[in-house]
Image: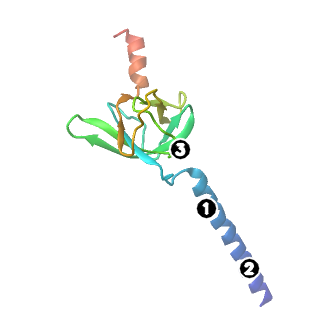
Amino acid sequence: MSRSLVETLLGAVVLAVAIGFLIFAYNKSGVATSGGYEVSAAFNRVDGITNGSDVRIGGIKVGTVVDRELEPETFRAVLRMSIDETVALPMDSTAAVVSDGLLGGKFIDLQPGAEETLIADGGRIAYTQSSLLLEELIGKFAFGSD
């Protein structure tokens, strides 16, 4: 009977450690939204960007992409991003879809502007740069087309 009690206690300890590890991993993953404010931006192409993709300023993560949709009037891809409330973006800020190295994933790179007026919750970033297709660039270089 004491062996059964020891096995039960050991199983409970292993289960508690596993639950603790899952909680730690979830908190470190950045999957949960930070409770910041939302901004949107329209792009011609958002290849490689998915829900949960990083939004960075100067290489530091300041938010995540929370939704992607197609704007029916212009056929542009609209991204909604959750930005950390400690980061105040000027109205003339820019957003670009960039690659994290040659084989890395893509993320949104924000470049803050210089205006004193700030983008409010639900606002829109007007100046955007869409993603570049590596295959398209190689084709232009290889075949010399403009």
Say which mark, if any, is on residue 77: none
88 and 16: which one is in front? 88
Q: Residues within 10 Å of mark 3 (few under 14, many from 20)?
A: few
Which callout, 2 or 3, points at the residue further toward the start of the chain? Answer: 2
Quarter in which the C terminus is drawn: top left
Q: Position of residue 126 (x, y in %)?
A: 34, 31
- Does dot 3 land on a helix, a strand or a loop? loop
Question: In this rendering, is residue 16 above or below 42?
Answer: below
Task: Report the Cα–Cα distance between label 1 and label 2.
Answer: 21 Å
The front one of 45 and 92 is: 92
User: In the figure, is residue 104 to the left or right of 45?
Assistant: right
Dot 2 crowding, Cα within 10 Å, few <14, some 14–19, many 20+: few
In the picture, measured across the screen, residue 73 lies left or right of residue 97, that is left
Q: Residue at x 35, y 41 (%)?
A: 123
Residue 73 drawn at (x, y percent)? 20, 37
Q: Amino acid at mark 1?
A: Ile
- Judge whether 21 appears above or below 94 on screen: below
Residue 9, numbered label? 2
Query: Which mark is on residue 23?
Result: 1
* Viewer-nearest residue: 105 or 4: 105
Image quadrant containing the N terminus: bottom right
